[in-house]
Amino acid sequence: MQGHAHHHHSAPLSSRALRYSLAATFIYVLVTLVAGLKAHSLALLSEAGHNVTDLLALLLSWVAVFVQTRPATGTKTFGYHRAGVLAAFVNALTLVVIAFYIFYEAALRIGHPVEVHAPLMIWVAVAGLIMNATISWVLFRSASDVNVRSAFIHQLGDTVSTAAVIGGGWAILLTGKTWIDPALSLGIGCLILWSSLGIIRETLNILLEGAPPGISAQQIVSSLSLLEGVQDVHDVHVWSIGSDTHALACHIRIGDVQLSESDLLLRRVKELLSAKFHIEHTTIQFENVVCEIAHGCVIPIGPSREPAQLKSSR
């Protein structure tokens, strides 16, 4: 007896906010890059690299919203969620290289200081602070979607980073100490590295079909076992299809009950998985005999017994 639940969230009305944020961040990356080269400021160049991580976070959130509107096909039965995950993994590896390049340049600058155009550095950072604060506000207003919330947190961190660049620019103006610029770039490089390693860890877990963060098979078994009518839960597999789309397959042993009773129990199981673990895509097999484990779960079927199937959709 099997139950299949297929639930796809409708794309939230946050796509417009993400598109605006993407365009503004992309323009700021270009402006910061050009200004950093003109002002000889490694901190501004590092800020451009850090904004690339924000651009990536916003792009992934937008892609996640977009792919939810695309139906699965006969060959792409889970849709295109993994394409965004794979792109995130490749881009995060690139950002790790950028972070180490920033460390290398900062070490050279500390040993051989370069004159920095502090006023230009400050004005570009002020423009970036205004832009980041505006984007954070726009995303905050649309943060009912978990993808947008993650982009909002990322953007908020970048606002703090930009404020640090402004402070560094004023410190250079007041003290004339040019080592402040590479010191700031080291801090921003560490922020890029930390963000990138987090993305790598998350995407690798998804690509290797590990359990989503905060969820374990043991927790699911314990929760489902408390439901009335559930005698045993085994052969549990839980994984992520995309960054915020989780799936589960398991076997549940129940008593020899009528089809209508098993359907009611199936609904309670799906409601628990959705409410407690945010798992919407489920494949659940009901059994009423002891399951023999051999290369998975195999139930011996007598010649006069045919497996009953129960299919329901949410």
Image (cartoon, rainbow, N blue to C red):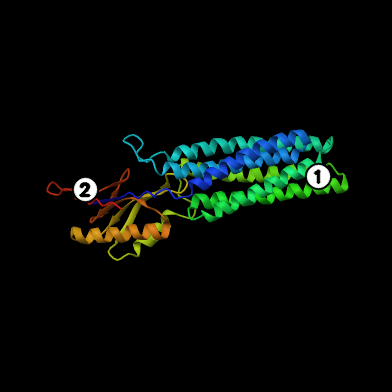
Q: 29 or 275, which is in the foreground?
A: 29
Q: Report whether 167 appears left or right of 231.
A: right
Task: Look at the numbered discs 1 and 2 and tell me whether their residues touch, using CB distance below 8 Å.
Answer: no
How crowded is the residue under tag 2: few (<14 C-alpha within 10 Å), some, or many (20+)?
few
Q: Residue 66: percent from the left, percent from the top?
A: 44, 42
Q: Residue 249: percent from the left, percent from the top?
A: 34, 49
Residue 294 makes an appearance in the image = yes
Residue corresponding to mark 1: 180
Q: Quadrant of residue 90?
A: top right
Q: Is residue 100 above or below residue 1?
A: above
| 1 or 2: mark nearer the eye | 1
Q: Residue at x 32, y 43 (%)?
A: 295
Quick one: SS at disc 2? loop
Q: In the rendered structure, find residue 300 and report the number of the disc placed on it.
A: 2
Q: 95 or 159, which is in the foreground?
A: 159
Kind of residue at badge 2? Pro
Q: Residue at x 24, y 50 (%)?
A: 311
Q: Residue 89: percent from the left, percent from the top?
A: 53, 38
Quick one: SS at disc 1? helix
**Residue farthest along the left direction in this orientation:** 304
Q: Report whether 298 appears left or right of 115.
A: left
**Residue farthest along the right direction in this orientation:** 175
Q: Which is nearer the N-term, disc 1 or disc 2?
A: 1
Q: Residue 76: percent from the left, percent from the top?
A: 36, 36
Number of numbered markers: 2
Residue 196 makes an appearance in the image = no
Q: Is residue 104 above or below residue 293?
A: above
Q: Report whether 57 appears left or right of 183.
A: left
Q: Report whether 282 appears left or right of 124.
A: left
Q: Is residue 294 above or below residue 37?
A: below
Kind of residue at badge 1? Ile
Q: CA distance from mark 1 to mark 2?
A: 73 Å
